[in-house]
Structure formats: structure tokens, C-alpha cells
Image (cartoon, helix red, strand yellow):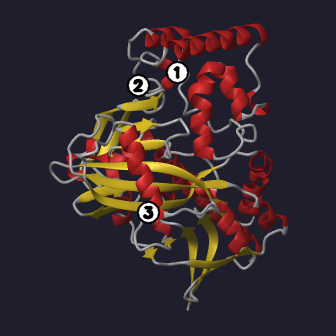
Amino acid sequence: MSEHRPVVILGGGLTGLAAACHLDDLDPVVLERDREAGGLCRTYAEDGFTFDCTGHLLHLRDPAIRALVDRVAPGAFATHERRALIHSKGVFTAYPFQANLHGLPQEIIRACIEGFVEAQVARARDGEPDSARMSFRQWVEATFGRGIAAHFMLPYNAKLWRTDLDEVECGWVSWSIPRPTLGEILRGAFGTTVRGLGYNPTFLYPRRGGIRTLPDAFAARFGGLRLGAVVRAVDAAARTVTLQDGTAIGYDVLVSTLPLDRLLACATGLPADLPRAGRRLRAVRVLNICLGVDRPRVSQAHWIYFPEPEFSFYRVGVPSNLSDAMAPPGCSSLWAERSLLRDEPYDETRVVDETIDDLRRAGILRRADRVVHRRVGVLDPAYVIYDRHRARVLPDLLATLERLGIRSTGRFGAWEYNSMEGAMKAGIEAAAWARVRLGLETEARRRIA
């Protein structure tokens, strides 16, 4: 069976769905391999508990994206003020670490303040360092000083990225890591909780149903979504997508939100160096350990960071603090994130047991608490690694694909660190690109005829 569409979209996550809704007059088709839309923004419900695929909170800074969300899911979201903590040195402190040092051992506070002042003096003397030439480790030490780097920034990110931080460039951090003033650091060290720093001091979350509420709202407005449609091959020369069941769909332009390395591995008609470069793109997986507990309010936080290596996870979230509908009455729900290399083995039973033990050591769970639900999910990929290879090859990879009529976009299509807002913006931008591309091609065909 074969057919032809002006626009074919690979992947039914937020980027693909946003693109489709902005191209609906062109009758695009969205091919999603899973049996439900959403990509990473999926939710499952079981035993009365509702869990997302780790923490998915909606931070909206662009008025156009806020208006879009209000239009597709009116009244579905409640606004929350961030309650985030860090657990280190045996104590809980407020997020961000660098602005809320009070409660840590005095020698740690002193080292953090001294390091920050030294970094500021160095910048005043030498000028702002060239971040484009710096590794993530160098950027952290130059920005926050060696104390904050050593006691939070570097150990936390080492747990997340699972790679040498001198190999990671710092281009992904400019919008996501709060940079307090010296005054804010001093106030936080003397006991004033410094609030409102960073890109997420407030956020939106669905009143009911989990984060899948958002992709479900997009999908309900679009009729061209095909679930269970597994892409077997893309022929960039013939402009054809072939599915696992043998269906061939021709296209004029292709919007792909597949992980870039997987797109390059299944595509033909590309320059030979593209698949080779794709094989060297790196990412980490994340284990999402979901637990239901038979006690309410095990923590007041929305999420907690764990930088120290003696804890198996780097972050814990409490979805039952986002909505009462996320857990049965009298219960709490927890998720813990644990980073793995993409070829690293793991034992699911052992992972759950280690997580429960670590939550008890941290004081979040009590010995008497009963875990009444447990589940382990895998996000693969979860976070792309901003290493030197990525920085060197990515611009040419994406530009070459666009010349062939393929827009590879979204969190994994563009091989980037991005938010849900960024994913939707990427879809809207891909739709605009497709319209321009189709217009140019229509004009070219008219001239040839």
C-alpha cells in the first residue's frame, strides 16, 4: 500500500503534534510508533496512582505558547509556586543551592562564599570568560567559584551526564542554571530563603490526569495521527517513508522528531558521512523509579536534588504534591531518576530496593512506610550529551538534512536540551519551515512545467 502527503511528520510528541496542528490545512500525517501520543510527555495510571515519565512541569515564558496552551487545553492547568530542595551534607536546603547555603556546615558555607567572591574578582579583573571555549567544568568554576562547584554543581551534573565534565561544553546551561548576585548569596547564607531565581519559580501542572493532558489535547484537535506506526526506513532521495508493515508514504517535506541518531541509521539517500557522524552522538538513559507509599505527605517538596554519589538517584519528585488526584487518599507518590549510559545493564529489582533504601537514609521514607506500588520505566534517550563531537558536527548534519527536505527538530531530533515550551516552539517553527519549503517547491515545479 502506498500514498502521498505534502507533509509527513515522524513522532507524535509535543513537537510533532504542535507542527501538525499548525499544518492541518495541508492534511499532514503524524506517524507515532507507540499506542498513545505524547513521546516523553506520557502518563500511566495503576493501583490508583498516576505517574508521568519523570518530572514534566510546564514553564511558559513565551506569551504565544501560553496562549496556545490556553486554547488547546482551557482550564486544565493549575499554577504552582516552586517548592524544590537539595539534600546534601545530611541536610535539606532550598533550591537553588548557590543562593540558599544556610543550614550547611559552616566550613562549606565559607568555601562557597569565598569561591564565589574569588570568581567575581577574577571576572572584574580579566573580563567575562569566553564560554564558547570553555568546558562545563570550567564554566561552573568561573561562574560560581570552586566551592559551589565542588559541593553541588559538579557532583550533581556528573551523576546526570555520566561523563567527564571537561568533555561537556556549556552551551546548554545559559537559560537553565540560576546565577545569583553576591547579595543574594549572602542573604541565603544568613538564613533568608532566596526565592524566584531561575526559569521555573512558578509552573503549570494539570489539575487531573497527569502531563498527558497536554498531548491528548493537541491530538484531539488533529485527525491525522496514526498510532502504532513504526518507521522502518526513510529514503531521502525518493522522499518516501516505509513503515514496518510495508506501507510506503511519499512526501514533499518531512518533519522528523525521531532521535537524530536513529533517523540517520534508518535513512538512505544521504551523504555517507551523515550516518557515521550520527553513530557518535551520545546521550544518557534515565530510569524512572515510581513508588506508591501508604502515608500522606512524605515530603512538602515538589522535587529534591541529590548531588552526592552515596545516593543512587540524582533527583526525586513527589507528584502527589502537584495534584491530589495523583495518589489514592492517605497515600503519597514518589519518582526517582537514575542516569545510565545507553549500553549499561541494570537489574530492576535491585534498582527499586536501592531506591527505597536511599529514600529511607535521606529521611523521606520511614521504616514503617509500606510501598504499595512500584514500577520502573526507561527513557532512552533522556538527555543528550553536549560533547565536542556534537558541537562539531550537529550544524552541518541538520543543514544537510534540510537541503534534502527533512527538518529534524525537537528535543531529540535537534539533539538538544529543551523544555516542553521549547518542544512546542520547535514544532511551530518546523510548520513555518514546511510552508516555505512547499511554496518554493511549488514555484519550482511550475517553472519546470
Residue 219 position within the rendered picture, expressed as x and y whole percent measured from the top left: 38, 64
Res. 150 mark: none
- Crowd tier of the residue under label 1, counting other residues whose Cα lies within 10 Å: few below 14, some 14–19, many 20 or above: many
Quadrant location of the N terminus in the rendered image? bottom right
Q: How far separated are the C-alphas under marks 1 and 2?
A: 9 Å
User: First in sequence: mark 1 or mark 3?
Assistant: 1
Res. 349 mark: 3
Res. 94 mark: 2
Q: Residue at x 75, y 70 (%)?
A: 447
Q: Residue at x 33, y 62 (%)?
A: 44
Q: Amino acid at mark 3?
A: Thr
Q: Residue furthest left?
A: 329
Residue 67 position within the rendered picture, expressed as x and y whole percent measured from the top left: 37, 43
Helix, strand or loop at label 3? It is: helix
- Crowd tier of the residue under label 3, counting other residues whose Cα lies within 10 Å: few below 14, some 14–19, many 20 or above: few
Q: Does residue 197 show up? A: yes
Looking at the image, residue 295 sits to the left or right of residue 160; the answer is left
* Of residues 254 and 98, the one drawn nearer to the viewer in this rendering: 98
Looking at the image, residue 133 sits to the left or right of residue 64; the answer is right
Q: Residue furthest bottom?
A: 1
Residue 52 position within the rendered picture, expressed as x and y whole percent measured from the top left: 37, 55
User: First in sequence: mark 3 or mark 2?
Assistant: 2
- Crowd tier of the residue under label 2, counting other residues whose Cα lies within 10 Å: few below 14, some 14–19, many 20 or above: many
Q: Which residue position is annotated with label 1? A: 98
Q: Does residue 39 show up? A: no
Instruction: Name the quadrant containing residue 277.
Output: bottom right
Q: Residue at x 68, y 35 (%)?
A: 170
Helix, strand or loop at label 2? It is: strand
Residue 349 position within the rendered picture, expressed as x and y whole percent measured from the top left: 44, 63
Q: Amino acid at mark 2?
A: Ala
Is label 1 in contact with label 2 (beta carbons under 8 Å)?
Answer: no
Q: Amino acid at mark 1?
A: Gln
